[in-house]
Image: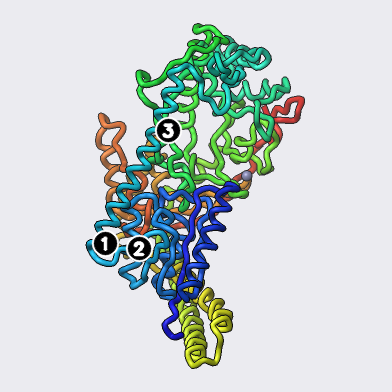
């Protein structure tokens, strides 16, 4: 019985649909039966449910690859290579990695390649499967194209203002005007085209009139839906299919480690490749064009405002954790940083009650303090010292943590060894052994992850500047920061500030001043040359403020300070309308 192999199993299904849940159960049953038949012991089952095989970034697959290092099992059992990854090259990547760690991979449907000849055969099979899939996808796409060409409209949901009439034996599917919705469409276009409404005003008016979008939990129109509608040529009698296609986003809005769908961004195809299908028009082309022009105008106005008026934009946060965004000038004489909870829930009541922060005051206070800091060696060295002490104590506690984890791991490992010896000597049955050993192994792998996390802290070892460097930097900064354009101030703010947490009476500012000459020399260039108004101060990613900090290690001083906002009259409730909303 000593030869019993310890196994891990891996199963994956790409959706969490009912039928697929069946598949995952089937997979598990098959895997367990196979293991039992061959006398293998399953130590752990890894299951990724609802994950596409197009990506390798799957939580359980990651766990499996990670656990492969600790060798708690000797082999992985998988139903077929497709479960591992759709693409042959991805399969190979994982297979190679596991092989390097001495882990055997067993597929139930195909024999894993043992020699190079096998490997070629496996490769050919993989490539062939890939080709088959591509062929099926293409056939499916062609089928759609044919349907469109025959005059069928392919829609998941008809455009607002229309209803979809399904195809019958003698008529293809088509759009028909939904008079009630069409009336709303006409009204929205007129508001913008003829009365110069902003999108927000449209949203408010619709709410006031009790006109709800077709499907919405909040019962409120959102501006992106509206802007898509206002651009839709269907309303002037043209609709099209295939104008955009899904791609993996180049600059994803949110960095998420795991994505169930990778292609979340859309790219527009050239108009010549669209399929144009006539639909009944709801509005005239003149109104359509005028509305579009007005939106364009609103948009550029809005952009200009944003760019010029708010020094702390993008860096200032609400105590509730959300960002604050600049808003004001159009509604009153002051500019404010408002919690985005309010902006996002507009026009409904916001979930966050935090009041607006006066932008001019906050900008001025923060900027003054930044200048002070950058031009005073004393202030900077106070910050440097504070940071140095913090680091020392955090390094200390990290060291303690790691040592503790190591101690516990060692203890668990010897315990595990005792059990396996006992099992080897026939003291335990296999079931008993598993019952004792499994929790220990789980604990060991949890600890190894905790250790990795703890060690990450240690790596943040930016260099501490010396007094001479501090002095030279502050002297240069002092002369150059005197009279700076808004543009330049903004660049410096983006550069050095990481986060401003703002309540109505206090600002907590954190950041990092890189003591490279680039900061001051860029300013110097700006000062010296009047012809070069827009000297590019290189992007704020340069010093790793927003990018991976472990790649570059600039010399510099992290800082943190609090500012009290003097009492200014910031009305909490301005211009409430009948429904109690802010206008
Ligand atoms: Zn808030």
User: What residue occupies the far right of the structure in this picture?
Assistant: 578
Observer-nearest residue: 361 or 51? 51
Dot 1 or dot 2: first in sequence order is 2
Observer-nearest residue: 415 or 75? 75
Residue neighbourhood size for the residue with mark 3, other residues' Cα within 10 Å, grouped as few (<14), some (14–19), many (≥20): few
Query: Which residue is denoted by mark 2 in the rendering?
Result: 111
Find out whether the residues at labels 1 and 3 contact each other: C-beta distance under 8 Å.
Answer: no
Query: Which residue is denoted by mark 1 in the rendering?
Result: 118
Query: Which residue is denoted by mark 3 in the rendering?
Result: 140
Q: Position of residue 255 (x, y in %)?
A: 45, 48
As drawn, the label of residue 16 is none
Tell me if I can see residue 188 in this picture: yes
Observer-nearest residue: 282 or 75? 75
Q: CA distance from mark 3 to mark 2?
A: 31 Å
* Residue at x 54%, y 35% (from the top left corner): 326
Dot 3 or dot 2: first in sequence order is 2
Name the element at disc 2: loop
């Amino acid at each position: 019985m000593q030869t019993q192999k310890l196994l891990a199993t891996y199963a994956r299904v790409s959706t969490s649909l009912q039928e697929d849940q069946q598949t995952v159960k089937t997979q598990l049953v098959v895997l367990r039966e196979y293991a039992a038949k061959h006398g293998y012991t399953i130590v752990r089952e890894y299951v990724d449910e609802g994950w596409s095989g197009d990506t390798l970034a799957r939580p359980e697959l990651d766990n499996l690859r990670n656990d492969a290092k600790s060798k708690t099992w000797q082999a992985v059992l998988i139903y077929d290579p497709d479960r591992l990854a759709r693409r042959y090259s991805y399969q190979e990547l994982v297979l190679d990695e596991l092989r390097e760690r001495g882990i055997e991979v067993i597929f139930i449907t195909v024999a894993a390649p043992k020699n190079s000849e096998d490997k070629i055969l496996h490769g050919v099979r993989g490539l062939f499967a890939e080709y088959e899939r591509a062929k099926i996808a293409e056939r499916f796409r062609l089928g759609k194209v044919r349907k469109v060409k025959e005059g069928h409209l392919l829609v998941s949901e008809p455009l607002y203002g229309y209803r979809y009439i399904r195809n019958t034996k003698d008529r293809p599917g088509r759009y028909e005007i939904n008079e009630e919705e069409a009336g709303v469409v006409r009204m929205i276009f007129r508001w913008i085209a003829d009365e110069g409404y902003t999108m927000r005003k449209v949203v408010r008016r619709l709410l006031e009139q009790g006109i709800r979008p077709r499907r919405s939990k909040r019962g409120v129109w959102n501006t992106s839906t509206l802007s898509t509608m206002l651009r839709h040529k269907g309303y002037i009698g043209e609709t099209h299919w295939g104008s955009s296609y899904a791609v993996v986003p180049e600059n994803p809005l949110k960095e998420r480690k795991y994505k169930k769908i990778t292609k979340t961004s859309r790219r527009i195809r050239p108009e010549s490749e669209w399929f144009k299908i006539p639909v009944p028009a709801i509005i005239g082309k003149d109104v359509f064009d005028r509305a579009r022009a007005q939106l364009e105008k609103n948009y550029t106005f809005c952009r200009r405002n944003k760019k010029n008026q708010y020094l702390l934009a993008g860096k200032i946060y609400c105590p509730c954790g959300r960002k604050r965004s600049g808003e004001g000038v159009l509604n009153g004489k002051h500019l404010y940083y408002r919690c985005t909870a309010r902006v996002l829930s507009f026009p409904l009541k916001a979930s966050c009650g935090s009041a607006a922060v006066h932008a001019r005051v906050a900008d001025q206070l923060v900027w003054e303090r930044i200048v002070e800091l950058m031009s005073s060696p004393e202030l900077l060295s106070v910050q440097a010292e504070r940071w140095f002490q913090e680091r020392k104590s955090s390094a200390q506690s990290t060291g303690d943590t790691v040592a503790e984890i190591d101690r516990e791991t060692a203890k668990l490992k010897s315990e595990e060894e005792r059990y396996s010896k006992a099992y080897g000597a026939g003291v335990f049955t296999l079931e008993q052994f598993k019952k004792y050993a499994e929790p220990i192994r789980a604990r060991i792998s949890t600890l190894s992850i905790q250790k990795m996390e703890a060690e990450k802290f240690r790596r943040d070892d930016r260099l501490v500047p010396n007094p001479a460097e501090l002095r030279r930097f502050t002297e240069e900064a002092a002369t150059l920061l005197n009279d700076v354009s808004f543009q330049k101030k903004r660049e410096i703010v983006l550069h050095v500030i990481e986060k401003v947490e703002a309540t109505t009476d206090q600002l907590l500012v954190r950041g990092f001043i890189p003591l490279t000459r680039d900061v001051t020399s860029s300013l110097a260039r700006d000062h010296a040359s009047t012809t070069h108004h827009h000297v590019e101060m290189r992007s704020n990613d340069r010093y790793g403020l927003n990018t991976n900090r472990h790649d570059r290690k600039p010399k510099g001083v992290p800082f943190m300070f609090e500012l009290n906002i003097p009492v200014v009259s910031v009305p909490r409730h301005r211009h409430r309308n009948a429904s109690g909303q802010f206008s």
